[in-house]
Image (cartoon, coloured by chain):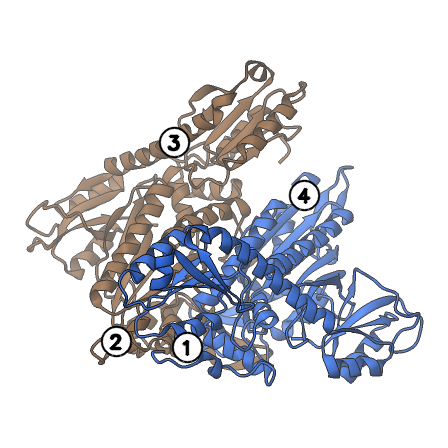
Chain colours: A brown, B blue
Amino acid sequence: MSDNKDFVKEITNIEENFPQWYTDIVIKAELADYTATKGFIAIRPYGYAIWENIQKYADEKFKQTGVKNLSMPVLIPESLLNKEKDHVEGFAPEVAWVTEAGGEKLEERLCIRPTSETIFCSMFSKWLNSWRDLPMVTNQWCSVLRWEKETRPFLRSREFLWQEGHTIHETEKEARERTLQMLDIYAQVIEDLLAIPVLKGRKTEKEKFSGAEETYTVESLMHDGRALQAGTSHYFGQNFTKPFEIKFQNREGKEEYAYQTSWGLSTRLIGAVIMAHGDNRGLKLPPKVAPVQAVIVPIAMHKEGVVEKTTQLYNRLNKKFRMELDARENYTPGYKFNYWEMKGVPLRIEIGPRDIENGEAILVRRDTAEKITVKLEEIETKMEELFEAIQKNMYNECLEIRNRRTTIAHTLEEIKDNLDKNQGYVKTMWCGDVECENKVKEETGAHSRCIPFNQENLDDKCAICGKHAKHMIVWGRQY
Amino acid sequence: MSDNKDFVKEITNIEENFPQWYTDIVIKAELADYTATKGFIAIRPYGYAIWENIQKYADEKFKQTGVKNLSMPVLIPESLLNKEKDHVEGFAPEVAWVTEAGGEKLEERLCIRPTSETIFCSMFSKWLNSWRDLPMVTNQWCSVLRWEKETRPFLRSREFLWQEGHTIHETEKEARERTLQMLDIYAQVIEDLLAIPVLKGRKTEKEKFSGAEETYTVESLMHDGRALQAGTSHYFGQNFTKPFEIKFQNREGKEEYAYQTSWGLSTRLIGAVIMAHGDNRGLKLPPKVAPVQAVIVPIAMHKEGVVEKTTQLYNRLNKKFRMELDARENYTPGYKFNYWEMKGVPLRIEIGPRDIENGEAILVRRDTAEKITVKLEEIETKMEELFEAIQKNMYNECLEIRNRRTTIAHTLEEIKDNLDKNQGYVKTMWCGDVECENKVKEETGAHSRCIPFNQENLDDKCAICGKHAKHMIVWGRQY
C-alpha cells in the first residue's frame, strides 16, 4: 500500500454489516488470509503474535498447576477412534482421512486428529500402573482438523490451533476439581488478558462434548450481541478409561479405572478479541495481548533531529514495552495514524520538533482517542498507567455491552422477541428437558449457552413448557 | 516401578549394542514412547521439556534477527506440491495423502506437509507487491510427515516436530547472507545449548535439499562415531519464486523475482543429545537444556527435620534453577541416585541429618561423579559454577571424541579402512564429481557430510579417482 487512502473507508461499517466488517478487519489488519487449501487459513505474523501472547500467558498458568506439555501423533487409526461410542458419533462425520502414504494404499484409514482423547487414552493405559503414577496432568499445543462446511477465519476453520489438556486422576473428586480449576484459568485468560467478561456455567446434555459426563464453559458476548463459546473443560468420569482399560492398583491394592478430564482453548479467541473490542476504525487490542503496545509516529520527519530523537526514544521504550517506530518515508503522519489505529495498537506516541524542544510527547489512546501531553522523563510511568487504564476501560466497555444485552424472558415468545430486538443473552427458567431446548433452537435459532454457576430464581416455571423449573439457563445466538 | 532395581542393569551396554542402548534410554528415561499409530511416537513430558528449552533458546535468537512466526495450513493440494519439479520428485514418494474428508471423497488429493515451501510460496506471491514489502522473514513451529520405511524415535520418525523458516529478499546477496546467518544460529543452538561441537559446511549437489541452489549444514558426531545432520539452511535463488510468480516492483520500478531461503531444525536434536552425551548410566544432559538441572535427594527421610529442611531448600533453589525434590517414600536413596542419573540430571544434592547439623550439602556431578561438600549459604553460587563447568566439560568431551574420530584418507581403501576401524569423520580431497561420491557410498556406506567452510589442502588429487581435487570433503556413516 503506497497511497494515502483512509483505511476507515476500506472497512465495512460495523453497524451495517458486522460479518463483512469482521472479514475486512481480518484481512486488512493482516491477521490472517485465505489459502490455496480450501477452508484453511494462514495466520499471518500479526495475528500469530496475538496467539503467542495467549499461549505464553496460559502456558505459564497451566504449569503453575503442575501441567506438563507433551506431543501426541497427528494421525489416529480408525479402530482407535471407534473405541468410545458417543465420541466417534460426534466426530467421525467431520474428520479427514489419510488413505494413502509412502506410495501405497493403507490397510487401515488414519484420521487427522479432530481432538486427541483416544490417542491420549491409549498412551495413558500404557503408562499407568499404580496410584503412585497419578495424577497425569498433560497438555499439548497443536492444530486439529474438523471438516466444516462453512468456514470463517478464526471462528470456524477446517484447521485451528489450540491446546488440549488431558488428565487422569485417582478419584472422582480430584478429577472434578481439576475440571473446574482449568475453567478458572480460562476465565482468567479471557477476562484478565483479553479484557472480555465471561459467563461461567455448565453445558446442557445436548450441548456437551461427545463422550463427556459434564462440559463446563466460559461464554463471551461479541459486539453485535452474538455469543461465542470461548473455552470448555470436560469431566469424563470413567467413560473413556473403561473402554481403553486405563486401570491402576489403588491404595488398597485393588484394580480401579482412573477418572479423566480434558479442556481446550483455541485460536477462536483471536476472533473473540476482534469481535468483542473492534470498532469502525478497525481492530482494538487490549495492551496485555497486543503484539505492538505503542507505536511512535515522528512528525515532520524531514526536520533535523526528529528521526534521531525518535529512534533513541524507541530504543529506550522497547526495553520495557512492545514497541514499533513508524519512520516510513512517503507516508504522511495522518496515514500512519489511521494505519496503526486500524491495527488496534493501544497507544500512539506523536513526537515532532516542538515536542523535542519542550522535552515532551503526545500520547493518544486507541480506546478513547484522548490526547495526553507528557514529559519525556516520565513517559514510561505514564505509559504503564495508561496501559492499565485502557485494559480496564476495554473490559468495562464489554461488560456494559453485555449488561445492556442481557435480558430476562418468561415465555418462548419473549425469548424470540428479546433476541430479535437485542440479540445478547436471554435468561429464563428451564425444566431441564431437551425437548424445550430443541424448541428454542427451532423457534429462535438460539442455543443454550450454559446453566450458569450463579443461579437466580426468576420464576417457578419453565419458560418454554410451563412445567416445574429446575435451572436458570442462558440462551443466545452464536458464532 | 516400585522395587529397588539397579537401572543400569536394565540398559544395554553402550559399547556392545549402541542402537539398543539408544532405544533403552529413550524408553526408560521416559523421553518418548511408541504409539498405536505405526511409525509415530509420543514425545513424553520429559522429552518434550528438552524440546521446549531448545525452542525457547532458538526462537529468541530468531526473533533478535527479525524473524516473525506465523502458521500455515497442514494440508497442501497436490497441484501446489507439483509446481516445482525437483521438489515434488524429492518429496512426493514419502507423503501421506488425505483423500476423504467430511464424509466425502475429495476432488483433489491433499498431502500432509512434508515441508512447506510450496504453501509459503503461494502466500508470498499473494503478499508481495513492492520492494518495500521485503524482506519477509517468517517461521513456523509445527510438525511435518515423511513416510519413512524404517523408523527410530527422534532420529527418523514418520512425524517430527520442527521449525521451518522461509524468507524472501530483494537481492541475492541479502538472501545468501540470511542463509548463513541462520546456519550460525543453528551452530549456537547445538554448541552453546546442547554442548555438541558442529562441523559447518556446504552439502554436495547429491545431498542438497530438493529444489535448492545450495544447502548448508551443521553436522554432529555421535558417541559411536556415526554422523548426524543436525540442521540445514537452504539458498533457493529464484528456483521457486519463478514458478510461483513471487514478483515485486524493484527500486527502479521494474518487475523482478524475489530471492528465497529456508532453514529447519527438528526434534532429531533430542536424539543428538542422547547419542552425543549418554553413557552406561543413562542419559546425560547439559545443564542449559536439562528439564531438571538439579535434584535434591533427602537422606534418612524418617529423621526429624529432614523433609522439612529439604523442602525449604527446594523452594529456595527452585526460584533460581529448574529443580526436583525426590521425597518419595518406599525408595532408598541408592535407588533414587540411579534413577536420576539415568534421567541425566546434571547435579544431585544429597542432604541428611548430619549435613543439616553442619549447614552443608553434598553436590554430585553427573558428568564426572565428583562429590563436593558445600555450605548451604553458598549453594546457589556453587551450583552456578558447577553448571558452567559441567556444560563446558561435556562440550570438551564431545570435542575430544570428535578429534579422536577424525581421520585423513588419500584413497578409497583408506576411507573404508578408517571408517571400519574408527567410524567418525574421514577427510579427503575430492574432484567434485558425483560418480566419486556414489562410489564412496557403495564401497563404504558413508555419505558425504559436507564440504567444510574450513578447507585444508591435504593432497592435490581426488582420493577416489585420482583426478585434480577441487575441495576437501568429509565423509561419514550416518543416522
Q: Are marks 4 and 2 in contact (CB under 8 Å)?
A: no
Front label number (3 vs 1): 3
Label 1: how many Cα within 10 Å (few below 14, some 14–19, many 20+): some
Tell me, yes or no, whether dots 3 and 1 are on the same chain: yes
The reply to whether residue B267 is in sight is yes
Q: Is residue A216 above or below residue B210?
A: above
Q: In front here: A202 or B356? A: B356
Q: Kindly identify which chain the residue marked by label 4 belongs to.
A: B
Circle 1: element type:
helix
Circle 2: element type:
strand
Q: Which residue is mark 4?
A: B134
Tell me, yes or no, whether dots 1 and 4 are on the same chain: no
Q: Are marks 2 and 1 in contact (CB under 8 Å)?
A: no
Q: Is residue B252 above or below residue B203?
A: above
Q: Which residue is mark 2?
A: A257
Q: Determine the residue positioned at 12% across, 45% down.
A: A456
| Amino acid type, callout 4 | Leu
Front label number (3 vs 4): 3
Label 3: how many Cα within 10 Å (few below 14, some 14–19, many 20+): many
Tell me which numbered mark, 3 or 1, is placed earlier along the sequence: 1
* Residue A390 tag number: 3
Q: Which residue is mark 1?
A: A78
Label 2: how many Cα within 10 Å (few below 14, some 14–19, many 20+): many
Tell me which numbered mark, 3 or 2, is placed earlier along the sequence: 2
Direction from residue B92 to residue B323 in the image, left or right: left
Front label number (1 vs 4): 4
